Amino acid sequence: MRVKLVAGNWKMNGNLASNQTLLTALPPLLSGLTGMNCAICAPYPYLAQVEQTLKGTNIAWGAQDVCQYGNGAYTGGVSAAMLADFGCSYVLVGHSERRVIFGESDQLVALKFAAAQKVGLTPILCVGETLTERESGVTEQVIARQLDAVIGNSGVTALARTVIAYEPVWAIGTGKTATPDEAQAVHAFIRTRVALLDARVAAGLVIQYGGSVKASNARMLFSMPDIDGGLIGGAALIADEFAAICRAA
């Protein structure tokens, strides 16, 4: 039985004061919610604040990226072990902004995925196509390539300890959203592709949708059979909006 997950991605936003207001507001709004999981993925400098404020609540937390290497002489990197030290449960890997803006390759994403799992973190593996790729009719080929890099490096059974987030790049922060049927089609493709390798893993795989999810469209998206929650961007910075999305799940 899959349990929906709603994860907020703060991206490069926030400060100590605004974070505290948001983090303090969320637990009462989400208290008592059952049948779903919720999490916050915050920038590195604020993980201590997030841990301190959310510890003991029903909200988990994680980071937005991780270094592919373990602790060592990698100036500027943040290892998976360091994230675990702050009580992180999740870490985003392969977010489209990391792939597009920072040039992360499928192979690098696969290494980060493995590094996260090595210390017991649950990677939220982001996959998705650009507008050009969608209009060219190669959405499935792009998703397959991104998935295959991770499966080739870690094996399909590693997906039993992960979450996949399908995020059409053209719908992130643009206000555009894939229709529920469009999103469902890609989610079904992902599950079917994994099922060809391991039906048990595919059946239990949590696949989120990430692409301008809001309280107004969350319930319709989450009602699709293969959409298991959402990876939430801008709406995760507004307590009432994020809580409404969680309630929709």
Image: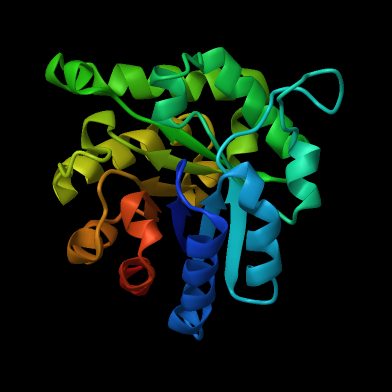
The quadrant in which residue 153 appears is top right
x, y percentage for residue 173?
A: 26, 40
Quadrant assignment for the C terminus: bottom left
> Would you place residue 214 above or below residue 82 in this image?
below
Judge by depth and name the residue closer to the eye, 146 or 57.
Answer: 57
Q: Is residue 71 visible?
A: yes
**Which color scheme did the rendering employ for the protein?**
rainbow
Q: Residue at x 64, y 26 (%)?
A: 112
**Apparent side of residue 181 relative to residue 104 in the rendered image (left or right):** left
The quadrant in which residue 81 appears is top right
**Apparent side of residue 80 relative to residue 248 in the rendered image (left or right):** right
x, y percentage for residue 117?
A: 71, 38
x, y percentage for residue 102?
A: 47, 18
> Would you place residue 25 above or below residue 99 in this image?
below
Judge by depth and name the residue closer to the eye, 72 or 141.
Answer: 72
Q: Residue at x 35, y 64 (%)?
A: 238
